[in-house]
Image (cartoon, helix red, strand yellow):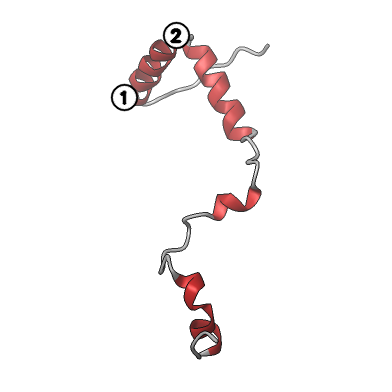
Amino acid sequence: MVRTQISLEEELYKEAQEEARRRGISFSELCQHTLVLALHPPKPERPWMRFSGLIEGDPDASSSVDEVVYDRERP
């Protein structure tokens, strides 16, 4: 285990202390857990889902793909 020192904005420190208290863990544990998640995020079961919701558009677009792609009505 390595001991280190960091500087935080006061408001961020207060929020982190409160979150640790809410979870029932120490501030140090919260920092460690947060760093682990930041450096090693969990891999989703369905990797393609990470793109879900990134593009805005017509939610019914799949029903009009022929019109959009081929510029014609669906057969």
Instruction: State the image coordinates of residue 38 (x, y, percent, origin top left).
Output: 57, 33
Query: Foreground residue, 24 or 11?
Result: 24
- Could you say whether the residue bearing mark 1 is in a helix, strand or loop? helix
The quarter of the picture where the N terminus appears is top right
Residue visible at 50% across and 91% down in the picture: 72
Q: Is residue 43 above or below residue 23?
A: below
Residue 19 appears left or right of 67: left
**Residue at 44% over, 14% down:** 23
Place of residue 69 in the rendered image (x, y in percent of width and height, measured from the top left): 55, 83
Secondary element at image label 2: loop
Q: In percent of the image, x 47 and y 55: which residue is there? A: 53
Decide which of 73, 17 is in the foreground and name it.
73
Residue type at numbered disc 1: Glu
Q: Which of marks 2 and 1 is nearer the N terminus?
A: 1
Q: In the image, is residue 71 above or below residue 53?
A: below
Q: Nearer the viewer, residue 8 or 18?
A: 18
**Mark 2, residue position:** 24
Position of residue 45 measured from the top left corner of the image (x, y, whole percent):
65, 41
In-image side of 1 versus 28 (left or right):
right
Classify residue 21 by image quadrant. top left
Please name whichever residue, 60 or 8, is drawn nearer the observer in this view of the structure.
Answer: 60
Q: Which mark is residue 11?
A: 1
Pointer 2 and pointer 1: residues touching (CB < 8 Å)? no
In the rendered image, the residue lying farthest to the left is: 11
Q: How much space separates mark 2 and mark 1, taking CA atoms?
A: 20 Å
As drawn, the label of residue 53 is none
Which amino acid type is marked by label 2? Gly
Q: How crowded is mark 1: few (under 14 residues within 10 Å), some or many (20 or more)?
A: few
